[in-house]
């Protein structure tokens, strides 16, 4: 499956999740989105929101791997 990337390090909450969600909505089930986030609030909120939306989420440093479900 395809792996897509998104860099939202220049954005702030809640725009980081909004941009991430818009990209996720365009992906097929099973595709992966690698998101680069700024440290802090976004790094807490984006993985939590993605998991709450039912996606598989893994965090490594400031990178978040989200597999669309």
Image: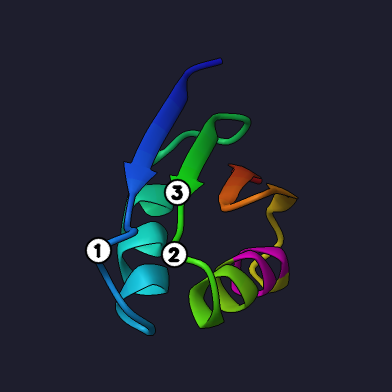
Circle on res. 38: 2
Query: Whole-percent x and y of residue 22?
Result: 32, 59
Above or below, 1 against 29 in this view is above
Distance (Cα) linking label 3 and label 2? 7 Å
Above or below, 5 against 14 in this view is above
In this picture, residue 64 sits left or right of residue 24: right
What crowding class fits label 3: few (fewer than 14 Cα within 10 Å), some (14-19), or many (20 or more)? Answer: many
Which type of secondary structure does the marked residue at label 3 adopt? strand
**Residue 48 belongs to the span the image colors magenta:** yes
Q: Which residue is mark 3?
A: 36
Range of residues picked out in magenta: 47-51
Q: Are marks 2 and 1 in contact (CB under 8 Å)?
A: yes
Query: Whole-percent x and y of residue 10?
Result: 25, 63
* Res 4 → quadrant: top left
Which type of secondary structure does the marked residue at label 2 adopt? loop
Query: Whole-percent x and y of residue 8?
Result: 32, 57
């Amino acid at each position: 499956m395809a792996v897509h990337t998104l860099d939202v390090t220049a954005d702030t909450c809640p725009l980081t999740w909004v941009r991430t969600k818009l990209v996720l909505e365009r992906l097929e089930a099973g595709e992966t989105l690698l998101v680069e986030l700024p440290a802090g609030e976004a790094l807490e909120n984006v993985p939590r929101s993605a998991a709450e939306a039912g996606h598989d989420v893994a965090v490594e440093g400031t990178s978040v791997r989200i597999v669309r479900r």
